Image: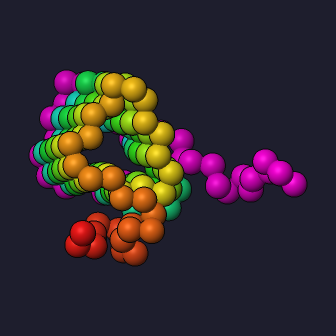
Amino acid sequence: MLGNKKSDQKPAAINTMIGAKTEAIGNISFQGGMRIDGKVHGNVTAADDKAILILSGSATVEGTVDAPTVIVSGSINGNLIARKRVELHADAHVEGDVHYSSLAMDPGAVVNGNLYHEQDYPNKAGTVKNA
């Protein structure tokens, strides 16, 4: 049936949060859903294929972001790898390459880097083909 998707394809619920006044130093690996309102100095990587990462307008990540679904309103200083979908809202700012399968980009969003559609997307999470 058109528009009928399996229930196991829903993104995970948010079960981890880094608050606006929190600064994390080091790499983070998560499962399920994660929301970042603060700062992360390190890579943020999802450990499962249903994970979702939300970066609010106050969020900053200094490192690579790698998750199936990524919604960005904040800043990323590093590459962004979204194996399923990436949403770049109007306040999003990415200083690095964006690898995606599906992309939604609002007017005002900034990407200072290259955009790579799924045909150029790496087979393994965290590794990128040379352009």
Q: What residue do we see at 39% from left, 26% from top?
A: 107
Residue 77 percent across, percent down from the top left: 17, 44
Q: Nearer the viewer, residue 69 or 46?
A: 69
Q: Please give left or right for residue 70 compared with residue 1 in the image.
A: left
Question: Which range of residues does the magenta coloring cover?
Answer: 1-30
Q: What residue do we see at 74% from left, 56% from top?
A: 6
Q: Please give left or right for residue 99 compared with residue 96 in the image.
A: right
Q: How many numbered marks does the figure carry?
A: 0
- Work out which residue is located at the far right of the displayed protein and give it: 1
Work out whether residue 1 can be spotted.
yes
Q: Please give left or right for residue 22 compared with residue 108 in the image.
A: left
Q: Quadrant of residue 59?
A: top left
Q: What residue do we see at 56% from left, 48% from top?
A: 11
Give the colouring mode of the picture: rainbow
Q: Quadrant of residue 46?
A: bottom left
The quarter in which the N terminus is drawn is bottom right
- Residue 49 to residue 65: above or below: below
The answer to if 25 sits in the magenta stretch is yes
Q: Nearer the viewer, residue 75 or 117?
A: 117
Q: What residue do we see at 43% from left, 36% from top?
A: 105
Q: Nearer the viewer, residue 65 or 3?
A: 3
Residue 71 percent across, percent down from the top left: 42, 38
The quarter in which the C terminus is drawn is bottom left
Q: Please give left or right for residue 126 compared with residue 89 in the image.
A: left
Residue 38 percent across, percent down from the top left: 23, 30
- Residue 76 to residue 74: above or below: below
- Residue 31 to residue 110: above or below: below
The answer to if 33 sits in the magenta stretch is no
Residue 92 percent across, percent down from the top left: 31, 31
Work out whether residue 31 can be spotted.
no
